[in-house]
Image (cartoon, helix red, strand yellow):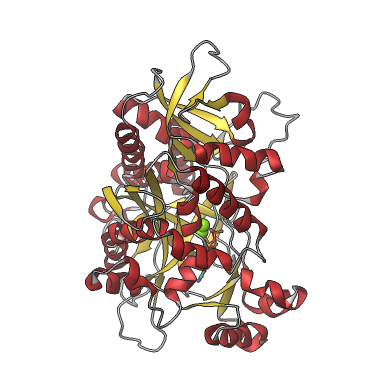
Amino acid sequence: MSRQIYPQYPPDLSETQLQYLLTTIKDWSIAHGLAVRPPPSLVSHEQDPAGALAITAPVTLFPSLFPRACFEQGRAIQTAYNELYAAIASDEAWLKEIVEELVDVDDFIAELWKVHLAVKQEGYVQPLTLGLFRSDYMVHLDPSDASAAPTVKQVEFNTIASSFGGLSSQVSALHKYLTATEAYPEESSSIIKNSALPLSKSVPSLAAGLADAHTAYGSSRASLPLCVLFLVQSPERNVFDQRHLEYELFSSHDVKAFRLPFGEVQQHTKLDEKRTLIYTPPQTPHKPYEVSVLYFRAGYSPDDYSGKNDWDSRLHLERSAAIKCPSILTHLAGSKKVQQVLATPHSPHLARFLPDEAKASELRKTFAPIYPLDKSEAGLEARRLATNSETAVKYVLKPQREGGGNNVYRKAIPEFLKSQPESHWPAHILMEMIEPPALNNTIFRNGELQKGGVIGELGVYGVCLWKHDVGTTKSEILKNYEAGYLLRTKGDQSEEGGVAAGFGAVDSACLV
Ligand code: ADP
Ligand code: MG
Ligand code: MG
């Protein structure tokens, strides 16, 4: 796909073809765990007091077209991105400067930093960190050069709770199955063909990452059986996404994992005198486990912290000898502010972390311009752009938050800024909107079909395991690999793309 548009894609379906496709998708999805717990708006607690029901995850009926060169570009640079973020997380002095710009305007970042400082003072007892990262991109067409090939631009880099690795493998397998079993109309077979559909290996790869960290932890210090602990939100609608990783970890690596709601950390875990993390499953109170790897699928949002108790829990976990996925420093490295500092035009910072200029220049190609909203020269220019309704339309304003639903878009930016004290503006970054080509597809969500223009967002997963002693800037990478992909697709009327936040669907790529 250069600039060529495929108006005939996806193909039209007769009513019979549509019903056949939907039946196949519905049954395959449930049979393979391409599923979520139903939203309360669809099934209330009274209707399902046992919490036994699940529904098909939101999916696209067809794999969305995606330029092959862009797909390869995103995959090829993942290990360099892993290296970059491992290096940032290993440079406490540099992160401190970033955090210092935020502490007065962002309580959440301030609290995270406090946790780090408390552990640093006492001394970290675990030098290994695991990253299960996801770098997100959109296809970008250069508006000033009609003949330029499309490239990918990075939306953001996730260092904590990168989700949908479980469902992504499943939806790419679903689209392959639909293709192989000829559920799509014959006239599309020159486009939707097996060789154009990359299977996402996110489930085996992310599980291998957890298993690698588990192995690197070594043998038990407390003479207990070892386990991996998934820290989760409760309730969690996207539970099957996480379960796929847990089941793969067990079936392929023989590693046992438990799920622990973040709010129950102190009830069920304790530290011994060497700060070994001991988890006692409530269902087998006589059989405690030693935690090798803590996998955070919670704790990334202020909503996860209802008070001091939850911050005490985060500190308790960070103090422990378990390998954190991610550590607090790695969590902070994933903030939008770090991305901005790297991607502000003419920024010198990338070279500090990625001295290999060839690698750095590949990453730089994926940066969209991002500006601070402080009083630096770039910041003052950004303030001018963001407060003028004519120029603001090209931008998105982002706070230091994860999980979707936090951004302010385009013409809403000036008014939003006016509603905030100016001293708080630096809590945000201003990013140029990436304008990907509009494609067509149909999303099947909560039993309903939404047909029309869509926008795709590619996520590339990465596994990185590294060793770093806080206080030094040396780090040693032990494992570094690309770990499968995710395509998320949303209606082109929606600015946000979160599947869990209710805006999009999981999808797979049909390379063209
Ligand atoms: P979060 O960490 O909450 O997921 P993101 O930076 O990914 O924050 O923003 C959420 C969504 O907003 C993205 O999935 C994407 O759909 C949209 N978005 C964010 N940045 C841009 C951008 N520069 N251009 C176009 N869309 C964007
Ligand atoms: Mg994010
Ligand atoms: Mg995102």
Q: Which percent across, then down, holds residue 398?
A: 59, 68
Q: Which percent across, then down, holds residue 378?
A: 53, 84
On screen, 427 above or below 221? Answer: below
Q: Which percent across, then down, holds residue 38?
A: 62, 38
Q: Toward the viewer: 323 or 22?
A: 323
Q: Residue at x 45, y 53 (%)?
A: 330
Q: Residue at x 49, y 44 (%)?
A: 19
Q: Which quadrant of the structure image shows residue 146? A: bottom left
On screen, 153 above or below 255? Answer: below
Left or right of residue 273: residue 374 = right
The quadrant in which the C terminus is found is: bottom left
Q: Which quadrant of the structure image shows residue 87? A: bottom left
Q: Is residue 40 visible?
A: no
Left or right of residue 350: residue 415 = right
Q: Toward the viewer: 62 or 240?
A: 240
On screen, 253 above or below 294? Answer: above
Q: Which percent across, then down, holds residue 437?
A: 43, 73
Left or right of residue 436: residue 446 = right
On screen, 4 above or below 306? Answer: below
